Each structure stands twice: as C-alpha cells, then as structure tokens.
Amino acid sequence: MATVKIPPVLRPSVGGQSEVPIQGSTVGEVLEGLAGEHPQTRDQLFSSEGELNRYVNVYVNDEDVRVQDGLATGVRSGDTVVILPAMAGGL
Amino acid sequence: MPSGSQVIKDIRSQIEEVDPSDVYELQAQNGSAPDFVIVDVREQGEWEQGHIPGAVHVPRGHLESRIERAVPDKSQRVILYCATGQRSALAAQTMESLLDYDDVASMNGGFVLWKDRGYPFDKPRILTSEQKERYSRHLLVPEVGLEGQQKLLDAKVLLIGAGGLGSPAALYLAAAGVGTLGIVDDDEVDLSNLQRQVIHTQARIGEPKVDSAAQTIAALNPDVEVVPYRTRLSKENVLDLIADYDVIVDGADNFPTRYLLNDAAVRLRKPVVHASILGFDGQLTVFVPYEGPCYRCLYPQPPPADLAPSCGANGVLGVLPGIMGLLQANEAIKLIVGAGEPLVGRLLLFEALSTQFTTLRVRRDAEGCPVCGDGVDLEGTEFEDYEALCAAAG
C-alpha cells in the first residue's frame, strides 16, 4: 500500500482527505487506483489520451517520475506518492 | 627562566612558517574553492583596518573557544596570520599541541609584510556604533559576522507584492539591515488584508500598500532605503524593474506574473526566491538561473483555472504566508551573505494542519525547458503573452 499525498485543489475530489492509501506497483497503477476510487480526480490527473497532465507533477520518494520511468515508475509498499500542481497564491 | 622573546623564538622554531608569497600563490591557484583556511588572529580593530581577502577572523584571545566553529575539520590545512607573525606562531602552537589540529602554519611577517608586498586586501566598511549595537546578534554568528552584515547593508532586494508573503519578508529583511528594498505592488490596503499582511495597519486602510510598507520599514530601521513601485509587473517594465536588484522575492498572486518574472529573471540571471500558498499549504524554492531549475522546469504549464484557485477565492490561514514569507527572507539572506545551502533544486512543501515539511528534488530541464534549456538564446526575443498562456490552460 502506497500513501498518495493529495494537494489542496484535489482534496474536494477525494472527500477532503490530504492522504489516501492506494494499492499499486507502478505510479500508473496507483493513480489509476485513485481515479477508480475517486472518479472526479481522473480528468484532473490525466489527459483525454490517458497521459499525465503536464501541469501535474508526481513524485515518488521525493523524485519527479518524469526523470524516473514516468507512469511505469515502480512503487513499493510504504512509498509516498506526491501529486503536485502549481499554486500561484501569494496574497 | 627564559625571557618572553626567547619563548616566542623557541615556539617559532617548532612550528611551520610560510612566506606571504606562498599564501598569495596558494590563493591564486585555488580560486573560489580553496582546500585551506586562512585565519586572522588579530584584534577586532586591526581586522577592521584591513585583512587578507577570504580570511576568517578569530582573535587569538578567543582562539580556544571559537576556532572549532570557524574550522570544524581538524585535518584541514590552516594558515594563521597576525600583524608580524608572532601571535600567529603562538596560536599555531596552541592549535597543534592543545587542540589537535594536524596541519597549521603561521605566515611569517604577518599582514604588515603582506601589505608591503602589495598583495590585495579587503578593508571592511566600518559600522557606526549604533549599527554595531543594532546588528550585534548578527555580528556574533560567524556565518553572518561583520562581512555578512556589510553585504546585507549593500544588498538590493526586490519584493514582488507587499501582501501575505511580501509583508513578513519585507519586515524581517528590513530588520536584518538589507540596504535597499524595492517593493512592487499596485494595490491599496484593505481591511481583509490585515489578517495576515502584518506590515500594514488599520489606520492605513485605503493607502497604497507600497507607501504603507515604506512607513512601517522607516519606523523599524532607518538604514533601509525603500523604493516603492506602485505598479504591476508587466512585459514592458519587468526588465527595468529587476535589473538593479541582487535578489528577487516572488510573492505574486497569479500565474501570468510568476511566468513573466521567471522568464525575465532567467534572461538577466537574477535569483528568485519563490513561494506560493493556498489554504493551509505552502511551497518554497529558490531559482538560480542555470545553476538549478527555473519555474518553467518545475511547472512547464500553468494548471487550468479550476485547479488554480486564488487565496481570495479559497481562503488562507493567516499565519501560513507569515511562515512562508519568513522562509523566503531566510533564503534571501543566505543568498546575500553566502552562508549555508540555498534551496536550489529543492522544493519545500509545508502543510500547516499536520505540521509537516516535505522536500522534493527538482531538476533543471536542460533538454526541454523553453527558457533556460541548453541552446536557448533569449537575446532580443519578445516575452510571451502570459495572460493567454494561462487562459489557454483552462
């Protein structure tokens, strides 16, 4: 079981939680699992072609999956997957 | 009983002595990252009259209590000097025989001979007695010290926004003695700002934020010159605004401004201390062009509007920008004095509700970044239409 950290903007789509435990052995499986449990997150995470949206960064163990193996990046039980869209607020 | 001069002579025969020319050549060969430390063991007043560039100051009277902070690695090569080479010889003997340092030498002839040979030296600007008292707690920490304080007084920091992030950052940068603080903001103080924008006051509601901030800073520290810019950052003014500044503190509240600032800062190679906030969550990083990633390496595309609510729409815990703004001030001060590890290539996430800090790695996208990528030449190019870029994301 991996822990998925949910950014503030996605929390309304997962019932307000900031962390969600999800099964999966790759980033793709974990995010697919999240979208399965919380369908509203699907369009926020994936493009219509099923690719990770470019404005969403995903990190496994503190490293961007884009410099690892993308959605095929391995996830072990106990790993933390961070979903991170850009935020602009300053005021 | 041997005489004092005999004792000094004996000690000088027991320790290694080097000539100023050896030290000068060693410095010239090693450049900015030397594998040795030069320590000035003279008194404060002598140090202030001038010292060897790059030397650290540990007066001989404080040697035993302070040298381990200045030179933590006891196997490192250390070269000591004083005015003529006597006190440094005694200090070298103390370091080797009592403090277990392996490789200590004393510079023969000291600073007097160094100057006579015409080698370069730094003459620190002297602080007034009031400044010495005001910044005394900085002067006591070796990572800042007199040199760091002078760098702060000479530094020019530009704050984008005098709001949630800019208010605490400006207050502490002013208190720290940053000599010039430029503030860019076109807004006026509103009652709803005062829950977090602590540089403003109830009495100044309706006044321009830049003027309100300038008044607070003037009352806090007269050493600081505030340059107010009552405007919004735009394609037309951004290069002129940032050109004169050493460090930019980004406390903007929207994506177009953040992308514009990034593209201009990369062009002029200005470091940007970046923070953003929403609700109970904050992000912080430092963009130093070409040394680490830029904002576009981290976020190549802005999110669509429904994933990018503003604090005005979604709310924010008042202390959150206080915490994040002070972390920005901390990074700015580190960049100015050259201490510690600035948050380059690392993105710090702060969650106020769970009180958790997470640090993620961020890399420069040398192959794909349209702004700081390898082979991208920004010279003479136009800035993008950032409003359109962000609208298109929706």
Image: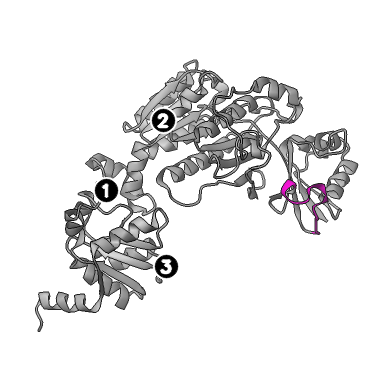
Residue B336 drawn above or below residue B162: below
Choose top left, top right, bottom left or bottom right for residue B252.
top right
Answer whether residue B344 is magenta in the image.
Answer: no
Residue bearing the label numbered 2: B181
Residue A15 screen position, x and y as percent: 82, 39
Label 2 marks which chain's residue?
B
The quadrant of the picture occupied by the N terminus of chain A is: bottom right
Residue B292 screen position, x and y as percent: 57, 44
Label 3 marks which chain's residue?
B
Image-based side of A70 in relation to B141, left or right = right
Nearer the observer, disc 2 or disc 3?
3
Choose top left, top right, bottom left or bottom right for residue B36.
bottom left
Residue type marked 1: Asp
Residue bearing the label numbered 1: B122
How far apart are the alpha carbons under marks 1 and 2? 26 Å
On the same chain, marks 2 and 3? The answer is yes
On the same chain, marks 1 and 2? The answer is yes
Rendered residue at 31%/56% (across/down): B55
